[in-house]
Amino acid sequence: SLNGGEKREYIYRSKLPDIEIRNNQNLASYCFEKVADHLDRPALIDGATGKQYTFREMELLSRKIAAGLDKQGIAKGDVIALLLHNCCEFPLVFLGSLVRGSIVTTANPFYTPGEIAKQLNACKAKVIVTMAAYVDKVRDLGCKIITVDSPPEGCLPITVLTEQDEKDCPVVEVDPDDVIALPYSSGTTGLPKGVMLTHKSLISSVAQQVDGENPNLSFQSDDVMVCLLPMFHIYSLNSVLLCSFRVCSTLVIMARYEITALLGLIQKYKVTILPIVPPTVLAISKSPLVTNYDVSSVRMVLCGAAPLGKETEDAFIEKIPAKIGQGYGMTEAGPVLSMCLAFAKDPFPVKPGSCGTVVRNAEVKIVDTVTGVSLPHGQPGEMCIRGPQIMKGYLNDPEATANTIDKDGWLHTGDIAYIDQDEEVFIVDRVKEIIKFKGFQVPPAELEALLVSHPLIRAAAVVSKKDEAAGEVPVAFVVRASEDTELSEEEVKAFIAKQVVFYKKLHSVFFVDSIPVNPSGKILRKILRDRL
Ligand code: ATP
Ligand code: MG
């Protein structure tokens, strides 16, 4: 398109046509639109106990819980905090809150009391739904505490929500721009940021993934998806929970991820869709255990949240011969920006290592980080996205919001990417993580992908180290395949050196027992940099 008749703007779109998205309703009504045809199908299965909820029960419980929240004094626009590891009650309370018109904020239950207090005070949470084991972390916050298991002193049982009369469910008027979810970003590069998502943003995002005659992600009602990703993170909340509800597929919930338990559940429930993050892809690709299980039911493996190299993708399908592809997300973007088109009902050919193509009903541009000029195919720059799915803004931070969403509605991601001639998105790395060796750019993700392709390396991370001559140099932290693996620093350096241009060579290699990653699978490079 032409901008002011002078400068060319390069705008990228999906290869799928736009669809009509009815995003002016309650997200719960949207999610339940097709339940009438699937009422007796299991919606949720607790992987550990086998306890199930059908779609009929789930829909009814959402109204009972809405009545219960109302009784507990939760009004439209009030905030409820979910401090839970994965369990059936998490989505049930989330749906109940949607029906009530209240807002759910989600936090990692392993956070310290201080971290939790900061988040819950900032959003003025009134009620906390948690587990007995976490109650001591939140006693002092002055909130009502409800536990999904047996309540300690001073706390209420979950039945104050689940055993109410659905006839008392309040009628709520919906403004599509009402905030309904307050997820927090992962805090990989700084403090986690509270992100305001609305009925409109989440309906749009789910529709961009699973709606239309040719859905980008062809989930079907007879699919079985396993939910091991933490529900407090937006990847799981949106692309796993909400997308599964929308298409009425079955969700098998794992409270705690562990590879043999996962393989056991895949075999037992004939799981067809496996949404995971790169460390799990890597663990499976290097695990000798997989051959002990029947994993032939898996047809789709969805990976996102952090960079995944094509070498790891290739190694993975040797173990689980399914279609593997990536999505690229960011909490602020609702979160999905791009999705693998091999997952479409009528699939497109895709390349390994790509993060898919921009979702439908949205626009992307790639801008030069210095001049802001938009760039053509093949040129890397900062990825920006515009569409009905992006966040309303950061909580209590109009300045940060204005720095992220510009006056034309473009959300600036902080990620460097390029789009190839086939409209596929390739993420190079975050602007903040790129190492600058004498002005040459070294993306740590590229070196990490090469490192983990080595059979004697189980995991790796690359960070920058200050250097007088070069400014910054790349150094690696490496986990050897096993305790008796013999692998020297010189061997690792040589392995990389023969595959990269001179300025990307590793300057040091440190052997460690593990690489710190957060629950959404991202390498915590700041912890490693501090160790240098
Ligand atoms: P914070 O913003 O608090 O530092 P965060 O950016 O890690 O944390 P999220 O919103 O969970 O928090 O993650 C979004 C980021 O994850 C993206 O900006 C991008 O850097 C990275 N990411 C997501 N998907 C992919 C992918 N498929 N490939 C590479 N990077 C990805
Ligand atoms: Mg971020």
Image: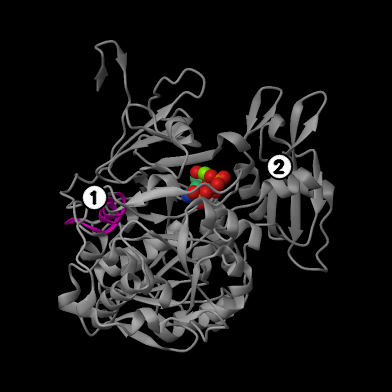
* Residue 378 x, y percent position in the rendering: 43, 30
Please identify the dominant SS of the magenta region.
helix
Q: Quadrant of residue 163?
A: bottom left
Q: Is residue 350 visible?
A: no
Q: Residue at x 37, y 52 (%)?
A: 340
The residue nearer to you, when weighing 34 against 97, is: 97
Left or right for 171, reference 377: left
* Number of residues whose C-alpha sits closer than 10 Å to that of mark 2, classed few (under 14), some (14–19) or many (20 or more): many
* Residue 273 x, y percent position in the rendering: 39, 69
Three-letter residue code for mark 2:
Val
Q: Residue at x 57, y 83 (%)?
A: 152
Q: Which residue has dot 2 on it? A: 463
The residue nearer to you, when weighing 130 against 330, is: 130
**What numbered label is drawn on residue 176?**
1
Q: Quadrant of residue 28?
A: bottom left
Is the residue 129 above or below the residue 126 in the image?
below
- In the image, the segment drawn in magenta is 201-213
Q: Are marks 1 and 2 in contact (CB under 8 Å)?
A: no
Closest to the camera, between mark 1 and mark 2, is 1
